[in-house]
Every structure is written in structure tokens, then in C-alpha cells.
Image: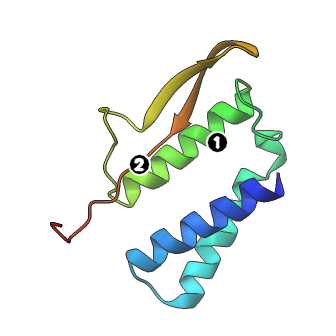
Amino acid sequence: MRRFILALATLFVSLMSLYGGPRERVRERLRTHIEHLTSEELAGRKAGSAGGYLAGEYIREEFAALGLGTFERVDYFHPFTTALHDGVFRNVVARIEGQNPR
């Protein structure tokens, strides 16, 4: 869980620094994201759970609001299955276009 939060924080700080904004605004947006994704409403975000679904929707909306591109699909969701659990799960994936043609 702590690794997830650290990875998420790193991602959002990186994205916010790419898309500008005063440092205090970046901190506040990061706090908002972390508080929402760790809220009781999402109940731990377990894969396949209602909380996990809501977390994915939230992240997809944030990626779209930042204008990030999708990766190999029309949407940000990439479904997958696992031998350990029944059902289809999904990752949320976005692409940041580079500016260096090399």
C-alpha cells in the first residue's frame, strides 16, 4: 500500500511539473488525489472491487483532464486476466508524447 501511494505521488508530481503551476498548487492537487484514493469510499481499491473500479475511473478522468494520450487503445483502460483470480481486471495507462524525435 505504501509503495502504491509513493508511486502515485511520484506520478502526479511529475505530471503536474510537466504541465506547470505554482508549487503550492501542485502540493494541494497531490494532497487531493491522495486523500481521495485513500478514502473510505474506495475501501482499499482492491482489484475487482467497487472501490478499485471507482479509483480507475478517477485516474482516467485525471489523465484525460491533463490531456494525456492513450496507449495502444482508444481508452486508458487495459484489461487483463490472472491465473490467481477469476474475472477480468484493468490497468489505467496513459502516454505522454515526447518532443525529441530521436
Answer yes or no: is residue 33 visible: no
Residue 85 higher or lower than 68, as above or below: above
Number of residues whose C-alpha sits closer than 10 Å to that of mark 1, classed few (under 14), some (14–19) or many (20 or more): many
Question: Seen in the image, is 88 located left or right of residue 65?
Answer: right
Q: Position of residue 5 (x, y in %)?
A: 74, 59
Image point 70% across, 23% down: which residue?
48
Image point 56% across, 46% down: which residue?
58
Q: Which residue is mark 1?
A: 55
Q: Position of residue 6 (x, y in %)?
A: 72, 64
Question: Seen in the image, is 97 located left or right of residue 62?
Answer: left
Image point 49% across, 90% down: which residue?
22
At label 2, which amino acid type do we have? Ala
Q: In the rendered picture of this protein, how many numbered marks are placed on residues?
A: 2
Q: Viewer-proximal residue, 69 or 35?
A: 69
Answer yes or no: is residue 27 visible: yes
At label 1, which amino acid type do we have? Ala
Residue 39 higher or lower than 73, as above or below: below
Please, which residue is most extreme toward the left here?
A: 101
Q: Viewer-proximal residue, 88 or 42?
A: 88
Number of residues whose C-alpha sits closer than 10 Å to that of mark 2, classed few (under 14), some (14–19) or many (20 or more): many
Q: Which residue is mark 2?
A: 94
Q: Viewer-proximal residue, 80 or 75?
A: 80
Q: Position of residue 24 (x, y in %)?
A: 59, 88
Q: Check if mark 1's residue and mark 2's residue have beta carbons within 8 Å.
A: no
